[in-house]
Amino acid sequence: MWKVTLCAFEDMEVLDFAGPFEVFSVANQLKAYQLLTLQVASVTDERIVRAKNGLTIVADTSLAAVFETDMLIIPGGDGSKALLENTEAMQDISRLNGHAKLTWSVCSGARILAALGVLDRQPFTTHHLVIEDVQKLTKNGFFVDKRFVKTGKYATAAGVSAGIDLALHMLLALTDSHFVKQVARYMEYPYIEHESY
């Protein structure tokens, strides 16, 4: 079973977090909870995380307590700016990225991947209001106007709802297109097999 780790931090965008969480939760449910283990990891030792506009989330663990993962998901939101300044959290993200088979961001979470250097000279997408921020954090990274962009083990999703599209696409690493369509149908979500960059 794959271990999927979803980072949680103060002032993160709710749908950036909840969209991928729903996709992987539904997928696991449809496979009788034998497909993956999904954990929410707070970037600090505080288990209670207040997302943007006040939604409170209780994390399963802290990022520091996670020693390995197969998939690392980084949401965005205004809190991603503060996360860049959290040296310890950034070190934990970098450490887990080293173990992960797939690492990806949603929306302004691309700031974090950019700061890790993995978007240097690579195509990326992000929320339209954050493009310049991300470009400044990369060495010659370049924006592509797509719902999501995947290059090797790294991927970025555009703003907010695009995280659902990328999560469905990433589910292909664990299953197949027929099952991904089942998950989207269960969610009443219009699944489109987007081509990555």
Image (cartoon, rainbow, N blue to C red):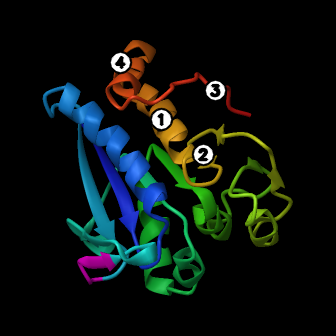
Q: Position of residue 50 (x, y in %)?
A: 35, 78
Residue 195 — which label?
Answer: none
**Kind of residue indicated by mark 4:** Phe
**Quadrant (top left, top right, bottom left, bottom right) of the N terminus:** top left
| Vertical arrangement, residue 167 with respect to residue 51, above or below | above
* Whether residue 22 can be seen here: yes
**Residue carrying label 4:** 179
Of callouts 3 and 1, which one flags the residue occurring earlier in the amino acid sequence? 1
Tag 2 and tag 1, C-beta contact below 8 Å? yes
- Of 135 and 12, which appears nearest the observer? 12
Disc 3 to disc 1, how far (Cα)?
Answer: 12 Å
Of callouts 1 and 4, which one flags the residue occurring earlier in the amino acid sequence? 1
Disc 2 to disc 4, how far (Cα)?
Answer: 21 Å
Report how many numbered discs are placed on residues in the image: 4
| Vertical arrangement, residue 49 with respect to residue 186, above or below | below
Q: Nearer the viewer, mark 2 or mark 4?
A: 4
Of callouts 3 and 2, which one flags the residue occurring earlier in the amino acid sequence? 2
**Kind of residue indicated by mark 3:** His
**Kind of residue indicated by mark 2:** Ala
**Residue carrying label 1:** 170
Of callouts 2 and 4, which one flags the residue occurring earlier in the amino acid sequence? 2
Tag 2 and tag 4, C-beta contact below 8 Å? no
> Is residue 46 within the magenta segment?
yes
Disc 4 to disc 3, how far (Cα)?
Answer: 16 Å
Of callouts 2 and 1, which one flags the residue occurring earlier in the amino acid sequence? 2
Circle 2 SS class? strand
Disc 3 to disc 2, how far (Cα)?
Answer: 13 Å
Residue 155 — which label?
Answer: 2
Residue 194 — which label?
Answer: 3
Determine the residue located farthest toward the top in the rendered image. Answer: 178
For the stretch drawn in magenta, the main secondary structure is loop
